[in-house]
Image: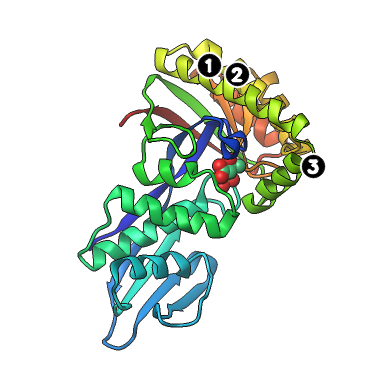
């Protein structure tokens, strides 16, 4: 049986500033994935989505029907439109281990896996560029003004150095890094943090623009450090990036407490990742410190901590 899947993603550096033209660095988070399995359905039954994790079973109306937006349905409607195909008789079963609103790209991963599965089931697989363009359209419905970093890193499943509107650049990571990804347990929709950032920027660009630029400069330093394997430089850069995100109001008391707990327990550096205000925190550790930092994060309130190795390209 064919199955399509897509990973989550981790923004290592540069979230939010990337919306305003600064570079950012993101890597796939292969441990957490959305998986979509197509199953044949009886003739005339149409296209149906079965998402047992969120207890939803939804019919996907044909492209000729009323405009309708839903995170499960919309990607499929876009894909059917792109293929010029009527809805087939098919059931798509969706499973996900990614937290929703967790700053790990759950929306883009869901759209990627759904569209991939549909293309495979119809024997008309999407090439990565076409898939990326469709998932970006979905992201626009979610966020209004997404940078495009989430769909890009998730569709290509490679580390990326991303600048909005520029040709895609993959990034090589010279030495594998051990990261702990801590879930704050607070679901924080990206649409809200991105919208608040826009309001802040429009109200007082003299305050936000220099911070975006500082983040951009730091991303370039991080790129060099990743490419040359200078792990020592990365922890302080993560700490600085977190402080700049806090200045932009997208941290929270809990995220700050988790960062402090991680550093006190011997982490090299820590920062929020993704939209902020909740969602995820990423922590750079040496293998020897990982267990102690993991325990400290849980004591400080993390509901889940996952250890992952960042390397690439795969
Ligand atoms: O919260 P997430 O995982 O969707 O990440 C959002 C990243 C932002 O830079 C805040 C927004 C964007 O479109 O790049």
Sequence-wise, the earlier of marks 1 and 3 is 3
How crowded pointer 1 is (Cα within 10 Å; few <14, some 14-19, many 20+) is rated as some
Residue wearing tag 3: 203
Sequence-wise, the earlier of marks 3 and 2 is 3
In the image: residue 208, left or right of residue 128: right
Question: Splitting the image into 4 quarters, where does residue 117 fall?
Answer: bottom left
Q: In what element is the residue under mark 1?
A: helix
Q: In what element is the residue under mark 2?
A: helix
Depth check, mark 2 against mark 1: the one in front is: 1
Residue wearing tag 1: 221
Q: How many marks?
A: 3
143 above or below 163?
A: below
Q: CA distance from mark 2 to mark 1?
A: 8 Å
Find ligand 1 in the image and state its quadrant.
top right
Image position, residue 228 (x, y; %): 41, 12
Identified at 75% across, 46% down, the residue is 199
How crowded pointer 2 is (Cα within 10 Å; few <14, some 14-19, many 20+) is rated as many
Identified at 51% across, 64% down, the residue is 71
Q: CA distance from mark 1 to mark 3?
A: 30 Å
Identified at 63% across, 49% down, the residue is 190
Image position, residue 140 (x, y; %): 53, 55
Residue 304 visible: no
Q: In what element is the residue under mark 3?
A: helix
Q: Answer yes or no: disc 1 within 8 Å of ligand 1.
A: no
Residue wearing tag 2: 237
């Amino acid at each position: 049986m064919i199955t399509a899947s897509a990973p989550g993603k981790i923004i290592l550096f540069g979230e939010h500033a990337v919306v305003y033209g600064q570079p950012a660095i993101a890597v796939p988070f292969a441990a957490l994935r959305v998986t979509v399995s197509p199953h044949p359905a009886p003739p005339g039954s149409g296209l149906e989505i079965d998402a047992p994790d969120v207890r939803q079973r939804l019919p996907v109306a044909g492209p000729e029907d009323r405009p309708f937006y839903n995170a499960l349905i919309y990607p499929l409607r876009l894909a059917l439109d792109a293929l010029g195909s009527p809805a087939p008789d098919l059931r798509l079963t969706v499973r996900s281990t990614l937290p929703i609103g967790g700053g790990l790209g759950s929306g883009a991963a869901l759209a990627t896996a759904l569209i991939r599965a549909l293309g495979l089931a119809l024997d008309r697989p999407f090439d990565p560029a076409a898939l990326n363009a469709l998932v970006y359209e979905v992201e626009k419905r979610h966020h209004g003004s997404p940078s495009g970093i989430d769909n890009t890193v998730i569709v290509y499943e490679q580390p990326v150095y991303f600048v909005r509107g520029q040709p895609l650049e993959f990034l090589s990571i010279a030495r594998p890094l051990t990261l702990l990804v801590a879930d704050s347990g607070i679901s924080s929709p990206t649409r809200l943090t991105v919208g608040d950032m826009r309001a802040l920027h429009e109200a007082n660009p003299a305050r936000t623009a220099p911070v975006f630029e500082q983040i951009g400069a730091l991303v370039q330093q991080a790129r060099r450090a990743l490419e040359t394997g200078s792990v020592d430089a990365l922890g302080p850069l993560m700490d600085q990036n977190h402080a700049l995100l806090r200045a932009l109001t997208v941290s929270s008391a809990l995220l700050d407490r988790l960062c402090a707990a991680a550093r006190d327990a011997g982490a090299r550096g820590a920062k929020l990742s993704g939209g902020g205000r909740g969602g995820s925190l990423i922590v750079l550790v040496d293998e020897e410190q990982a267990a102690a930092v993991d325990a400290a994060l849980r004591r400080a309130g993390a509901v889940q901590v996952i250890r992952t190795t960042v390397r690439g390209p795969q």
